[in-house]
Image (spheres, grey):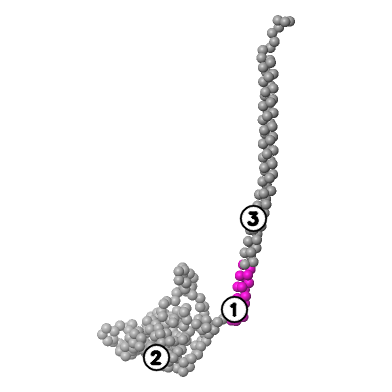
Amino acid sequence: MSGTVPPPHRGRARRTGHWSLAVVGVLAGILFATNARLFAEADTRRPENLVDLVRVERDRLEQTNADVIELRAEVADLVASADEFSQAGPDPEVEYAAGRSAVTGPGVVVKLWDAPRRDTLPPGVQPDDLVVHQQDLEGVMNGLWAGGAEAMTVQGHRVTATSSIRCVGNVLLIDGSVYSPPYAIAAIGDPAQLRRVLVSSAPVALYLDYVEALQLGWSLDEESELEFPAAEGSIAMAYAHKPGQEPITLPTTEPSPANGSTP
């Protein structure tokens, strides 16, 4: 049996298996060590992040609570102001300026009416020259305001910042009501001052020339006591706005023209 040949490479194969087991063991040890270190680091970081999260949320909650307290104080102040205003009632000066209160005092009354109709007209005279126009009313109203009028009425209607006064043909439209001549404009103020400034204004002086030439109607009377009612209707300004802001137009009736009907 001494001549039997053993299987080739058997001793080398056994040595290779030992080395493989050693390498696997080393790699397994490194893997276990790495996993242990990672888990250890994760365990040490997780509590720190939770603490930071709690701290951030706590600060945010404190700030929110502070904001709520501040807003509640503002609301309380606004409610208190509203209660004071409701108890005190409207400001008399504001009510007067807005025409929401009745007024009395001395003043003047101006009346205008159309000229008599004629079959023939002088050269250069048109039929429109025989009627009172919107600019004639505007001239009288502006002259009275310039003379220091404190309040005014047209056909008994209190004139305010929102009054709409227009002439259409030979009729007068005041806040939706229609009137025919004669037209009466009354103003409260110093009668002598009102008269002096009114008749010296250019539009009224021109109208008085037509009064003399074509017998357009005109009368100016001083009154010791005039009584004006409070303005009726809404005083909302659909077209008023603060400088620098876009105007807010509301779906209301025809806009009030800038006709000099306010002081």
Quadrant of the frame with the C terminus: bottom left
Between residue 156 and residue 180, name the one nearer to us: 156
Tell me the quarter of the image containing the N terminus.
top right
Residue 201 at least partly seen: yes
Q: Secondary structure at mark 2?
A: helix
Image location of residue 90, percent across then percent down? 56, 81
SS under mark 1: helix
CB of mark 2 within 8 Å of CB of mark 3?
no
Q: Is residue 91 above or below residue 21?
A: below
| Residue lying at the far bottom of the rendered structure | 224
Compared with 190, 171 (above or below) is above
Residue holding disc 2: 195
Q: Quadrant of residue 27?
A: top right
What residue appears at the point 69 percent right and 25 percent down from the top-left corner? Answer: 21
Determine the CA span between mark 2 and mark 3.
Answer: 77 Å
Three-letter amino acid code at the position of disc 1: Phe
Q: Is residue 145 left or right of residue 21?
A: left
Distance of mark 2 from mark 1, alpha carbons?
40 Å
On screen, residue 262 above or below 242 = below
Q: Earlier in the sequence, mark 2 or mark 1?
A: 1
Binning the other alpha carbons within 10 Å of mark 3 as few (below 14), some (14 to 19) or many (20 upward) gives: few
Instruction: Tell me the CA gap for discs 1 and 3.
Output: 44 Å
For the record, the magenta segment spans 71-89
Q: Amino acid at mark 2?
A: Arg
